[in-house]
Image (cartoon, helix red, strand yellow):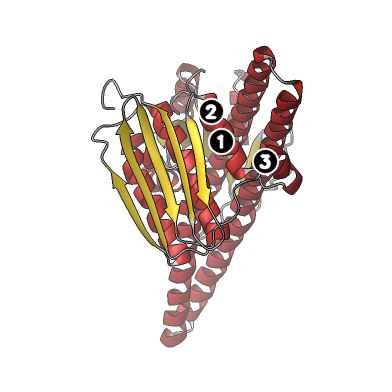
């Protein structure tokens, strides 16, 4: 089985002549999007030179302080056969729909005091791209798995059942990604629009010399911004935690458990006797499996305590996710899972077995649940 490649940081080219504003936007885009690197070009010539030499995931063109609208630069970029997605920051008064020949381009009109909207809009575009890329990768992986199952032969009924399971998993993944994209687009941008309204109101109150109302509005604005930042952070964590690549599996699992604790009130504990980093592929697989088990705890278990344990047993890594929740009857077959649409544990078992591991669920009504799986050990040749 081919190992998944490590994700490289997405590169963004920010074309903005104001150096201070460019540094501020770049820092905020990197914080919001996660896993991206922003480069700044302060002139047309510098921008075109960079685009000719390197590849970028997104270009952000600010026209606010230029004599021309910035759309001319986009036309020049297109003329040089660059087709990367772009975000154009327009001055007030420009019609964002006036040029439909530059797709894929999104427009944003930057009003006074609205500088914070640009980093969020850019991060939103990057997250949409990541969703699209991950969906395409998932489609290719599902196609490859189906091909391998067909080549293995064996029971026709079992192969057909597995194919139906994979189709069902794919549908569920698509639904989750669609929901995530809608959450990014609707909730985050609407929350930001509300914050802009609060800023405008605070400015008017300042002009009217009403300090008490002004202070109340500023407190409300801070709370709204804090909520939006938390929501975006959770969305990014759901897509792929940046700490999985930078810090490794254990800190990422610890963060996931703390998040579960905050959301459900359950006490959590992470235990590990593995004293080294694992291969990127193995760390990703373990994280996704534990994430699936914790999602089941969050949705169904009503548990007050959750334990995640990792240890090496021979040439295998053994992982246990245990809770003291309501439990269930684990004798659910592949067919039952497909009929009910609850394919989480069945999909986890399939994923483990496809990489040569073993998977087991211990549970009964009223006695909690233990999800146990073991995967072939793969060490990391060198630390990143």
Q: CA distance from mark 2 to mark 3?
A: 15 Å
- Crowding at dot 2, Cα within 10 Å, few <14 / some 14-19 / many 20+, comes out as some
1 and 2 marks in contact (CB < 8 Å)? yes
- Crowding at dot 3, Cα within 10 Å, few <14 / some 14-19 / many 20+, comes out as few
Closest to the camera, between mark 3 and mark 1, is 3
Tell me which residue sits at (61%, 61%) in the image.
Answer: 190
Tell me which residue sits at (49%, 22%) in the image.
Answer: 55
Q: Pointer 2: what residue? A: 353
Task: Give me the disc on residue 333.
Answer: 3
Task: Give me the disc on residue 272.
Answer: none
Closest to the camera, between mark 2 and mark 3, is 3
SS type, badge 3: loop
Residue 289 in the image: x percent, y percent? 49, 40
Task: Give me the disc on residue 349.
Answer: 1
Q: CA distance from mark 3 to mark 1?
A: 11 Å
Residue 333 lies in quadrant? top right
Q: Earlier in the sequence, mark 3 or mark 1?
A: 3
Q: Is residue 301 left or right of residue 158?
A: left
């Amino acid at each position: 089985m081919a190992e998944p490649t490590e994700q490289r940081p997405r590169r963004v080219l920010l074309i903005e002549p104001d150096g201070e504003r460019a540094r501020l936007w770049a820092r905020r885009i990197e914080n919001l999007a996660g896993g991206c690197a922003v480069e700044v070009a302060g002139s047309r010539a510098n921008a075109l030179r960079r685009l000719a030499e390197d590849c970028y995931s997104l270009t952000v063109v600010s026209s606010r302080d230029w004599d021309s609208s910035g759309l001319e630069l986009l036309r020049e970029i297109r003329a040089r056969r660059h087709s990367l997605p772009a975000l154009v920051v327009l001055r007030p008064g420009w019609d964002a729909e006036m040029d439909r020949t530059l797709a894929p381009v999104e427009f944003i009109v930057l009003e006074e005091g609205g500088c914070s909207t640009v980093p969020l809009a850019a991060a939103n575009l990057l997250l949409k791209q990541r969703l699209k890329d991950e969906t395409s990768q998932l489609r290719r992986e599902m196609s490859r798995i189906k091909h391998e199952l067909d080549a293995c032969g064996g029971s026709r009924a079992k192969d057909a059942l597995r194919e139906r399971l994979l189709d069902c998993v794919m549908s569920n993944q698509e639904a989750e990604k669609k929901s995530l994209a809608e959450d990014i687009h609707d909730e985050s941008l609407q929350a930001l629009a509300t914050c802009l309204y609060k800023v405008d109101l605070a400015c008017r109150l300042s002009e009217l010399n009403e300090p008490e109302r002004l202070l109340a509005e500023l407190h409300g604005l801070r709370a709204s911004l804090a909520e939006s930042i938390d929501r975006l952070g959770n969305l990014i964590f759901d897509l792929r935690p940046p700490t999985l690549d930078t810090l490794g599996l254990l800190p990422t699992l610890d963060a996931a458990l703390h998040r579960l604790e905050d959301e459900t009130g359950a006490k959590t504990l992470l235990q590990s006797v593995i004293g080294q980093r694992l291969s990127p592929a193995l760390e990703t697989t373990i994280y996704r499996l534990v994430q699936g088990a914790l999602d089941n705890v969050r949705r169904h278990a009503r548990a007050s305590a959750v334990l995640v344990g990792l240890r090496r047993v021979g040439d295998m890594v053994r992982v246990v996710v245990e809770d003291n929740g309501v439990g269930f009857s684990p004798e659910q077959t592949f067919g039952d899972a497909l009929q009910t649409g609850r394919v989480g544990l069945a999909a986890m078992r399939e994923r483990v077995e496809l990489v040569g591991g073993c998977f087991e669920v211990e549970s009964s009504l009223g006695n909690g649940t233990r999800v146990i799986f073991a995967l072939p050990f793969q060490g990391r040749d060198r630390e990143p």
